[in-house]
Image (cartoon, rainbow, N blue to C red):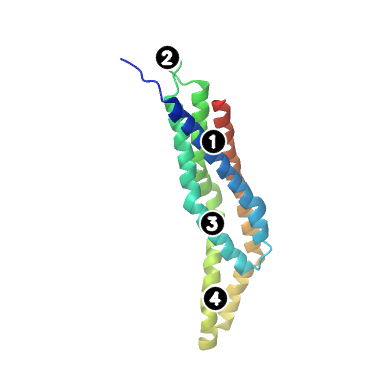
């Protein structure tokens, strides 16, 4: 039985891609929490909620996929590294890559377990904004001013800014998780 040696160019590409993607995602998460969200908090509540939702949708479209791509590269690296002699167990480098891959993939359960309650509350507020704006036309037609005013007060309440700020803090947790994967990847590579 012959063993094939992994392609050194393929390994370098996987290392570079995994580290670049995980470090970039961590930086993007920090930038959103540290720079974008504070600017959103300066906006009127209805505008802030719309802007948060647009940012949320854009992040949801690419962040999980890229995190899984980085994780897949780390898992590949753990799989192709030579095993320990004798028992064939994983080396320390392989464990580092395996852990880095698990951390990248781990932002998805983190999002569902830790961030989803805040996400749902914010999305409900965004839907409330859309509903209030749609109902403004009904006020003139059907005299439903009291209901629209009550719903508008709920959307514009102080809690909306608190929720966006809380979301930014929770998002930093994702940045830390992905940064840890990048650090492990760098450590295993050098």
Where residue 105 appears, as percent x and y from the top left, is: 48, 40
Q: Where is residue 48, by image quadrant? A: bottom right
Name the N-terminal-most of marks 2 and 4: 2
* Residue 119 numbered mark, or none: none
Distance from the alpha carbon under mark 2 to that under mark 4: 67 Å
Whether residue 121 appears in this view of the structure is no
Image side of residue 128 versus residue 31, left or right: left
Q: Which residue is mark 2?
A: 87
Between 180 and 158, which is closer to the camera in this rendering?
A: 180
* Residue 19 numbered mark, or none: 1
Residue that appears at 57% across and 43% down? 24
Tag nearer the camera, 3 or 2: 3
Name the N-terminal-most of marks 2 and 1: 1
Which quadrant, please, contains the N terminus? top left
Instruction: Label 1, secondary structure: give it.
Output: helix
Name the N-terminal-most of marks 1 and 3: 1
Instruction: Label 2, secondary structure: give it.
Output: loop
**CB-based contact (under 8 Å), mark 2 and mark 1:** no
* 45 versus 115 height, above or below: below
């Amino acid at each position: 039985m012959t063993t094939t040696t992994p392609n050194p160019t393929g390994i370098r590409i996987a290392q570079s891609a995994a580290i670049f993607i995980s470090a970039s995602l961590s930086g993007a998460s920090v930038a959103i929490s540290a720079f974008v969200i504070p600017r959103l908090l300066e906006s009127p509540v209805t505008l802030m909620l719309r802007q948060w939702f647009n940012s949320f949708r854009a992040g949801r479209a690419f962040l999980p996929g890229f995190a899984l791509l980085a994780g897949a590269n780390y898992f590949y690296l753990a799989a192709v590294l030579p095993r320990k002699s004798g028992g064939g167990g994983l080396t320390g480098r392989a464990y580092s890559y395996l852990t880095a891959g698990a951390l990248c993939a781990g932002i998805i359960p983190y999002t569902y377990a830790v961030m989803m309650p805040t996400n749902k509350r914010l999305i409900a507020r965004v839907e409330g904004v859309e509903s209030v704006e749609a109902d403004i036309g009904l006020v003139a037609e059907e005299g439903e001013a009291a209901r629209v005013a009550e719903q508008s007060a709920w959307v514009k309440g102080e809690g909306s800014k608190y929720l966006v700020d809380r979301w930014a803090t929770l998002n930093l947790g994702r940045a830390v998780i992905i940064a840890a994967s990048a650090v492990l990847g760098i450590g295993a590579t050098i």
